[in-house]
Image (cartoon, grey):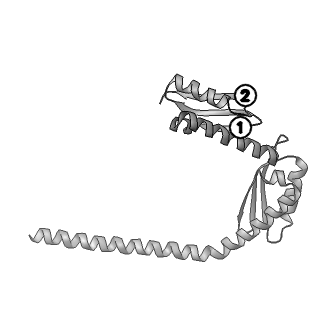
Amino acid sequence: MVRTLLAVLGFAALCACTSQQVQNSADRALNSVASQAPQLVADGALAAQVEARLVGIDPNSALHVALGVHAGNVRLSGKVASMATRAKYIVAVRDTPGVRAVDSRLSIDRALATPRETVRDFALVAAVRANLAAQLGASGLRLRVAAHDGVVTLGGTAANGGLKAAMLETARKTGGVRTIVDRIRVGS
């Protein structure tokens, strides 16, 4: 009986200690977030200024650029249509008030899709997905679908060869599909 009482008291003390440790950890996390809030707001405002400048230079390339801002340090990554656009982007970011440093990891892609092409590709992916779901149910929803200029790539797994053939035929019959790239594996 005494052993049981000691075990219960020890467990209660351990629970209290753990509860206090959890509370202390939560308090530290809350204080950390609260102390960083002004910097997060400043970084967000600077990011908005930089994005506006990039869109003003080349809105198409701006769609393909990822922007990271921390304490006035700006990182650009992604693709732009030309060397000239890349150079203009870097100068514009450096000239933005509040920017301390620029880390440019922009690559050149002369075949960068225009907004119209991007929307057309997105719509084609949606149409193929809708047809796959309508014809094949949940099996069609498991596929990865990508499109570029009428070329649709299907990836994923089909349970058997017959289902794979049905997936490919359903996608092929979708309006706007010129070519199918088959990356569907058979099996589980």
Residue closer to the observer: 83 or 103: 83
Vertical comparison of 32 with 177: above or below: below
Label 1 Cα neighbours within 10 Å, binned few <14 / some 14-19 / many ≥20: many
Vertical comparison of 93 with 138: above or below: below
Q: Identify which amino acid the numbered label 2 is placed on.
A: Thr
Mark 2 residue element: strand
Label 2 Cα neighbours within 10 Å, binned few <14 / some 14-19 / many ≥20: some
Q: Identify which amino acid the numbered label 1 is placed on.
A: Ala
Q: Quadrant of the N terminus?
A: bottom left
Where does residue 105 sit, x and y in percent of width and height?
Answer: 77, 51
Give whichever of discs 2 and 1 has the lower sequence position.
Answer: 1
Q: CA distance from mark 2 to mark 1?
A: 10 Å
Left or right placement of residue 164 versus residue 16 in this view: right
Q: Residue at x 67, y 33 (%)?
A: 153
Count of marks placed on residues: 2
Q: Which residue is identified by label 1? A: 147
Quarter location, residue 88: bottom right
Vertical comparison of 69 with 181: above or below: below
Left or right placement of residue 148 versus residue 9 in this view: right
Q: Which residue is identified by label 2? A: 179
Where does residue 3 sit, x and y in percent of width and height?
Answer: 12, 68
Vertical comparison of 182 with 49: above or below: above
Do the CB atoms of the residues marked 2 and 1 lie less than 8 Å apart? Answer: no
Where does residue 109 sit, x and y in percent of width and height?
Answer: 82, 42
Residue closer to the observer: 147 or 94: 147
Left or right placement of residue 104 versus residue 85 in this view: left
